[in-house]
Image (tube, rainbow, N blue to C red):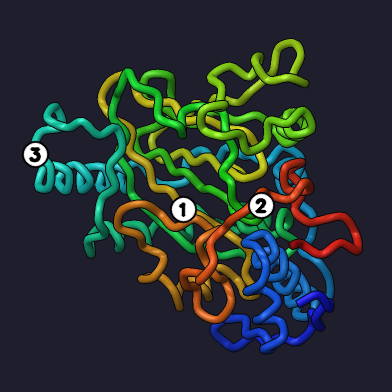
């Protein structure tokens, strides 16, 4: 479809599901994941302004988050709930795999029992409190929702997994990661390091945006365009601390624990036409993922969240390589 469709031909129902006209549906289906999520984000912004009479109010935290692409959130979950979840993950691992010393894997995901799901449900209002909600809404310019949640355990290893080299997730820029460290984040316990949007954009201008796996580096000093020392954030958080970061927009890398293990609750976030609490009440069972979490490039946000018949493909657009949310004014995503 070469002709630009009418981008206003959609409806939003009482559950927050966005339904497109047939023309828009065909246009989205003919494009990339970046087109799909750009349109969804645009609609969520329009819906917010239509409902509230303007964009979300700016906040100091929202401005800082929009500038850097990351934010530390100490004490997101009470330590008691961290202990409950971590102990439950240990029971799952022991029941399924036996002793940890017998495992070759460095990363495991726990299935969702009623206890684990109930603990996360109870904890969410504290994680996404009013200040954090306002910050994320200011960042997006609209409401947001959780579309995937996983419980993970990371074990020490001498080998380097591709996630533990400097990279960006090759996904549409609307995706956010909220990593809650159930066992804390430290040198010994492992964590995720990141650099801000400005440094990431410089790397992208020099060609290091979404490099092939074989070209990922362990030291950003090896990246052209990043002359001199590069400051990066190494979160230091106690159990229950969280790290919110724009994984497709900023360079980051994981660090495995050197002893023991690292347990995390990872929630993936993207925009929403209605508040997260309402989407959560409607979609809670579908957001709980056993095994690997969904990535936004594989999903269709229109109607009910579902696997897309066409996942991400091709090269990311240049504006995404440079860490922007949207293409230049007047340009539509391919």
Q: Secondary structure at mark 1?
A: strand
Nearest the viewer among 96 and 134 is 96
Task: Relative to 202, say whether 77 is above or below.
Answer: below
Residue at the image position 79 percent from the left and 55 percent from the top: 58
Q: Position of residue 267 (x, y in %)?
A: 46, 53
Nearest the viewer among 196 and 166 is 166
Residue at the image position 44 percent from the left and 43 percent from the top: 180
CA–CA distance between discs 2 and 3?
Answer: 39 Å
Q: Which mark is residue 173?
A: 2
Residue at the image position 39 percent from the left and 47 percent from the top: 265
Q: Is residue 60 visible in this depiction of the protein?
A: no
Q: Is residue 274 visible in this depiction of the protein?
A: yes
Task: Relative to 223, say whether 133 is above or below.
Answer: below
Q: For residue 174, which quarter of the picture?
A: bottom right
> Which residue was labeled with disc 1?
267
Residue lying furthest right: 330
Sequence-wise first label, 3 or 1: 3
Q: Nearer the viewer, mark 2 or mark 1?
A: 2
Q: Which mark is residue 98?
A: 3
Residue lying furthest top: 228
Nearest the viewer among 217 and 235 is 217
Q: Secondary structure at mark 3?
A: loop
CA–CA distance between discs 2 and 1?
Answer: 16 Å
Task: Relative to 334, say whether 103 is above or below.
Answer: above
């Amino acid at each position: 479809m070469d002709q630009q469709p009418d981008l206003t031909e959609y409806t939003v129902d009482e559950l927050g599901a966005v339904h497109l006209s047939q023309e828009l549906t065909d246009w989205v289906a003919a494009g990339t994941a970046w087109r799909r999520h750009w349109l969804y984000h645009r609609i969520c912004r329009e819906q917010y302004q239509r409902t509230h009479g303007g964009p979300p109010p700016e906040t100091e935290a929202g401005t800082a988050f929009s500038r850097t692409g990351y934010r530390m959130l100490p004490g997101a979950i009470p330590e008691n709930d961290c202990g409950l979840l971590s102990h439950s993950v240990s029971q799952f691992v022991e029941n399924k795999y036996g002793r940890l010393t017998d495992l070759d894997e460095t990363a495991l995901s726990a299935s969702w029992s009623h206890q684990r799901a109930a603990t996360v449900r109870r904890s969410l209002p504290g994680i996404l409190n009013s200040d954090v909600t306002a910050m994320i809404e200011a960042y997006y310019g609209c409401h947001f929702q959780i579309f995937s949640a996983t419980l993970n355990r990371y074990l020490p290893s001498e080998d380097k997994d591709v996630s533990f080299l400097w990279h960006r997730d090759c996904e549409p820029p609307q995706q956010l990661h909220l990593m809650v460290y159930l066992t804390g984040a430290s040198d010994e316990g492992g964590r995720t390091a990141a650099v801000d949007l400005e440094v990431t954009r410089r790397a992208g201008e020099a060609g290091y945006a979404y490099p092939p796996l074989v070209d990922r580096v362990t030291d950003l000093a090896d990246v052209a365009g990043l002359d001199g020392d590069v400051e990066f954030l190494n979160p230091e958080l106690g159990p229950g601390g969280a790290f919110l970061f724009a994984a497709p927009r900023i360079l980051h890398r994981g660090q495995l624990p050197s002893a023991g293990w690292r347990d995390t609750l990872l929630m993936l976030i993207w925009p929403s036409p209605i508040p997260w609490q309402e989407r959560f009440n409607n979609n809670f069972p579908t957001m709980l993922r056993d095994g690997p979490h969904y990535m936004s490039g594989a999903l269709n946000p229109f109607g009910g969240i579902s696997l897309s018949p066409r996942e991400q493909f091709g090269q990311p657009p240049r504006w995404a390589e440079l860490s922007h949310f949207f293409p230049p004014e007047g340009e539509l995503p391919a």
